[in-house]
Amino acid sequence: MKSWKNKLKGRAGELLLASGALLAAVGAGMVYLPAGLIVGGVLAIIGGMLAILGGGDDA
């Protein structure tokens, strides 16, 4: 069984993408709440499209 560090290395790009999207939405929400909600929704849609189109090898 792989250690949690090896599993984390395999998902590092996805974690960075998700945390960046979250921080961008929170930052926009601190300036103007509706903007934060819109940014969060747009980034969620883009993330979903990347997940669908990305494919890749899931081992």
Image (cartoon, rainbow, N blue to C red):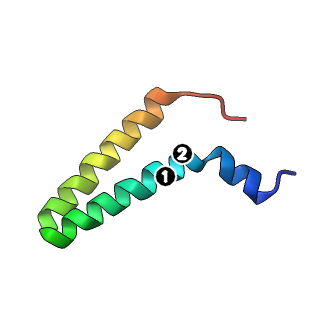
Dividing the picture into quadrants, the one containing residue 47 is top left
Residue 7 drawn at (x, y percent): 72, 51
Q: Is residue 9 above or below residue 32?
A: above
Residue 3 lies left or right of residue 59; in this view the side is: right
Tag 1: amino acid: Leu
Residue at horizontal 52 percent and vertical 46 percent from the top: 14
Residue 47 lies left or right of residue 29; in this view the side is: right
Q: CA distance from mark 2 to mark 1?
A: 5 Å
Q: Is residue 51 above or below residue 33?
A: above
Q: Quadrant of the C terminus?
A: top right
Secondary structure type for disc 2: helix
The residue positioned farthest toward the bottom in the image shown = 30
Residue at horizontal 18 percent and vertical 55 percent from the top: 38
Dividing the picture into quadrants, the one containing residue 33 is bottom left
Secondary structure type for disc 1: helix
**Residue denoted by label 1:** 16
In the picture, the disc for residue 13 is 2
Tag 2: amino acid: Gly
Characterize the local packing of mark 2: few (<14), some (14-19) or many (20 or more) Cα atoms within 10 angstroms: few
Characterize the local packing of mark 1: few (<14), some (14-19) or many (20 or more) Cα atoms within 10 angstroms: few
User: Which residue is nearer to you in this view: 38 or 5?
Assistant: 5
- Figure disc tally: 2
Check contact, mark 2 vs mark 1: CB within 8 A: yes
Residue at horizontal 59 percent and vertical 49 percent from the top: 12
In the picture, the disc for residue 52 is none
Residue 8 drawn at (x, y percent): 67, 53
Residue at horizontal 35 percent and vertical 62 percent from the top: 23
Residue 24 drawn at (x, y percent): 29, 58
